[in-house]
Amino acid sequence: MLGPKLTPVPANDFAAQWEVIREDALGALDRVGRSGQLILGEEVEALEAALAKWWDIRHVVGVGSGLDALEIALRCAGVDAGARVLTTPLTAFATTIAILRVGAEPVWCDVDSSGSLDLDLASEVLANDSSIRAVVPVHLYGHPLNPLALSALADQHGVIIIEDCAQSAGAIRNDRRTGQAGSAAASSLYPTKNLGALGDGGFLITSDDSIAHCARTMRNYGQEAHYRHVRVGLNSRLDEVQAAILRSALLPRLDDWLRRRAEIATRYTEALRQSRLRPILASGGVSANHLYPVEDVEGDPAATRRQLASRGISVGRHYPVLCPDQPASAGVGAIRGSLDNARRLSHREISLPIHPQLGDAAVEQVIDACLEGGQ
């Protein structure tokens, strides 16, 4: 039980978020109800346009989930059954699922110290395996990969780059937002994301007109026109209610929320840099701070998590089981190298609370709890 002066610090606080967005969200719901249009109407089109402007990209296509967005991006870019796809072992398993759902084979190589795909190692793997057709890098924790290096992989090795931006809304490197280095990218609107819906959702981004057209047909049963099915598609449509709430209540607040995340991350980094809970920082650019990961470099991570919980701090683990080690991966895919960094981080990483509703007092409570075990 928590002491009398300790207030629980949640990993996310959707109730507090609701108090901020309630009026705008209810207005958006009422607007959709009055319109009589519930699926793929003006609200989805308006959100797509607003997101494309915010992301500085030509096309945004709203779909049912981030997983669907990644699968559709792969299919529309020409990655299909039998292809081999290089990707990271340290990420949500949805990244691997998307590759498997298109009938491709995942090939995993190690990550760097920031937790992101090691692009130098990836280049070596591609140089030694011409059968790999595509690369799916993940901007893990919200840390942006180098877009110039990603483009170089495509140019030097002739591979398709499909970026997983589920955690990187707001990340910038080389004056570019993530998702602009490859043929297309996918992002999630799951409620915990920097831009999260009040339910599931996702979107694909691209500057390629043909990929965007393909994605719009794929999400709606493969229809190019009503009852004209040109592809074997999906039922993966971002609905009007979520689009309206996102456009009216959430997207307008995103830049302020990103600034708050950055403030919290800066305070954590200042306080913890020399502690045994070492911040896992971006290798360059500006992180979106979707998560604030630390590595327990000296202690027992499980004991540390218990100690933080005893002080009221809700923490996460991202990700305790590598994708190639999941039971669903048994007998599929290939591993290149030892995955030493990925295995170390999967065991020793702890995610501290970071969200826009987190107040200064709660941030200090987290820091005090982290430092309690010693420097």
Image (tube, rainbow, N blue to C red):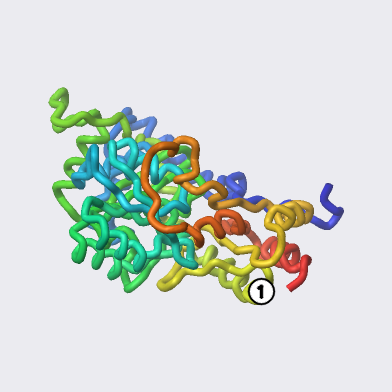
* Residue at which label 1 appears: 271
Asked if one can make out residue 361 in the rendered structure from this viewpoint, the answer is: no
**Where does residue 277 sit, x and y in percent of width and height?**
65, 67
Q: Quadrant of the rendered structure where residue 370 is? A: bottom right
Circle 1: element type: helix
Most foreground residue, 262 or 44: 262
**Where does residue 195 sit, x and y in percent of width and height?**
44, 52
Most foreground residue, 213 or 256: 213
Classify 10 Å Cα crowding around label 1: few (below 14), some (14-19), many (20 and above).
Answer: some
Asked if one can make out residue 88 in the rendered structure from this viewpoint, the answer is: yes
**Figure check: 325 above or below 112:** above
Q: Amino acid at mark 1?
A: Ala
133 with respect to 109 (left or right) = left
**Figure check: 23 above or below 9:** above
- Which residue lies at the image location 40% right of the left edge and 36% below the top edge? 241
- Which residue lies at the image location 27% right of the left edge and 49% below the top edge? 60
**Figure check: 31 above or below 48:** above
Most foreground residue, 351 or 109: 109
